[in-house]
Image (cartoon, coloured by chain):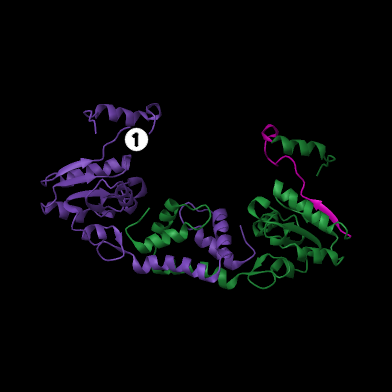
Chain colours: A purple, B green
Amino acid sequence: MQTPSKVLDNAVEQLSSLPGIGKRSALRLALNLLQRNEQEIHDFANAIIDLKLNVFNCTECGNISDHSTCDICLNPNRSSELICVVEDIRDIIAVESTGAFKGKYHVLGGVISPMDGIGPNELNIQPLIDKVSSGQVSEVIFALSPTMEGDTTNFYLFKKLKDFSSIFTTLSRGVTVGAELHYADEMSLGRSITQRQKYDQE
Amino acid sequence: MQTPSKVLDNAVEQLSSLPGIGKRSALRLALNLLQRNEQEIHDFANAIIDLKLNVFNCTECGNISDHSTCDICLNPNRSSELICVVEDIRDIIAVESTGAFKGKYHVLGGVISPMDGIGPNELNIQPLIDKVSSGQVSEVIFALSPTMEGDTTNFYLFKKLKDFSSIFTTLSRGVTVGAELHYADEMSLGRSITQRQKYDQE
């Protein structure tokens, strides 16, 4: 697909480099940008450039932050004894939005996936081992996606960490809150029966 | 949704201002951009800024161009007597990709759509009337989308232009090339029967 303008072609090329954006969608986005005024375009472009200049990875946990240490690691009300291991920062956002977790995080940067060429060495695992081996971590929550790759990574981490004096937990798996039971998939429903919990009025 | 970084929040905000991009997709795009190196980010941002600085609307037809007149209007091999009226530049790209048209274009910038507050005054109609009233246009092809709004616009343009000595045509409507007949919708199939054409061995 070629447009009547090389400059537009270039913008389409760049926009279609984003995940999930094909050439046609990219053209639609570029034409939308084309209709904006100069200020709006500069705000847009600067927001992108700022990503590179002013976003850092937290040296403690691998979360992203506007500073060298993230707000969660700096927060004195959050326990360093409880570490939630996640795949990437989207998972931190998801867990934070529940308000159910008061510990700190550790971002792996992915999961073990031999098909994609991602082994343990490609992941941010050693700093987690260092933290847990210090003996100051009472519980490690493996909060990885409930997929084959996530399970493999859980198993690998457990093997590396099990000799240190921590409790290791994973997210509970079962039926989705708010969905009708007969729509639940067999694996989740099966798990929710074998791992059934004592009825609690709360 | 809030991310751990105000800079990232801002990038997500800007990216989600694009059509069809929600907050979650915008976060995915921003995290992808975050992983690129400085050069790549600058290339990306500059491609966007360039849209505003170096893309112009052709003063003749409303097409976009890297110059004040587009390549199609400048091309001496394309007939000025034949004008194809389209909604926006995506339609020019679509028609050009067929290689079936050797005239010039006129971009309306939209179609009449009272529901969206778009009347004839919001569209680039007067320059088309000027062109046709000059008497140098032998045929005007209405190549608008086969929708209610497109048909309304066709009718409006026809009323405005019919007194000038041109032929007025629209795109033929009928069954899609390459699709099985029983999948054709009733309207298209009906049209293709009433507007059936003499069998031509070519």
Q: Disc 1 designates what residue?
A: A177
Q: Can you see residue A76?
A: yes
Q: Is residue B49 left or right of residue A65?
A: right
Residue B124: x and y, percent? 72, 63
Provide the residue span drawn in magenta: B165-184
Residue B23: x and y, percent? 43, 53
Q: Can you see residue A60?
A: no
Q: Residue visible at 18% across and 42% down?
A: A168
Residue A12: x and y, percent? 55, 61
Q: Is residue A61 left or right of residue B106?
A: left
Residue B182: x and y, percent? 69, 31
Q: Is residue B175 magenta?
A: yes
Q: Residue visible at 36% across and 48% down?
A: A116
Q: Residue visible at 24% across and 63% down?
A: A69
Q: Main secondary structure of the magenta part?
A: loop
Identified by mark 1, the residue type is Val
Q: Is residue A142 left or right of residue A181?
A: left
